[in-house]
Amino acid sequence: RQRVDTYLAIKYGTTMIGGETSYVQNTDNGAGLTSVGQVFTASTTGGVNSITLRTGGTANGATGTLYMCTGSVSLANCIANTGSVQMQTPQALTTIPTALNTVFTINLTTPAEVVAGNQYTFVVSSGANVYYSLQNTDTYLGGNRVGFGTQDMYFSVNVAPDMISPTG
């Protein structure tokens, strides 16, 4: 027997990477924010194993926390865990890059289970202002940015179909 692994990623940005879909190019650099998030629609069932973002300006070094919630949840509710939280424990981020247009990936220590067709919200919260790359309009139809406007972030959500819990 041979095992075949397949992976799917939702990508909103400028570069095509194998197995990912590229959406409209970002045209705007975001304002400095301490917390920002994005609603996305899962196109396959599996486990989110990483999220890729891009900085939209230079800023002071920052650490932060990643939250992921089920559904289209407000920034405050996702951080306060008042929504249906998808991640068991928020994940600490050691460093958020500070240089302009730096693409960086947040690898989840425990994959967050998602179901095809359902919406989810991820939020990155930091102790200092971080500039994220944003689209100046809401062009991604599967969701929108949460916190300070409805534009979309530059983002990629990597979902691996085989990375779900034993009960999933």
Image: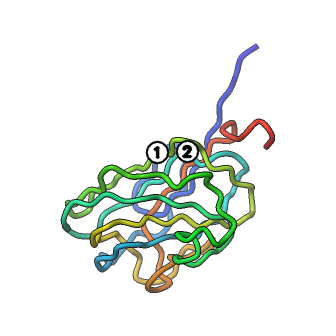
Q: Is the residue 136 above or below the residue 81 in the image?
A: below
Mark 2 — residue?
49
The amino acid marked with disc number 1 is Asn
Q: Earlier in the sequence, mark 1 or mark 2?
A: 2
Q: At 50% from the left edge and 76% from the top edge, which residue is drawn?
A: 145
Mark 1 — residue?
107
Q: Classify the position of the N terminus by image quarter.
A: top right
Q: Classify the position of the C terminus by image quarter.
A: top right
Q: Position of residue 143 (x, y in %)?
A: 60, 74
The amino acid marked with disc number 2 is Asn
Q: At 74% from the left edge and 57% from the top edge, which residue is drawn?
A: 116
Element on which disc 2 rests:
strand
Q: At 41% from the left edge and 66% from the top edge, which residue is drawn?
A: 125
Q: Quadrant of residue 63?
A: bottom left
Render colour scheme: rainbow
Instruction: Please indicate whether residue 106 sits to the left or right of residue 85 in the image.
Output: left
Towards the viewer: 26 or 71:
71
Q: Position of residue 121 (x, y in %)?
A: 59, 67
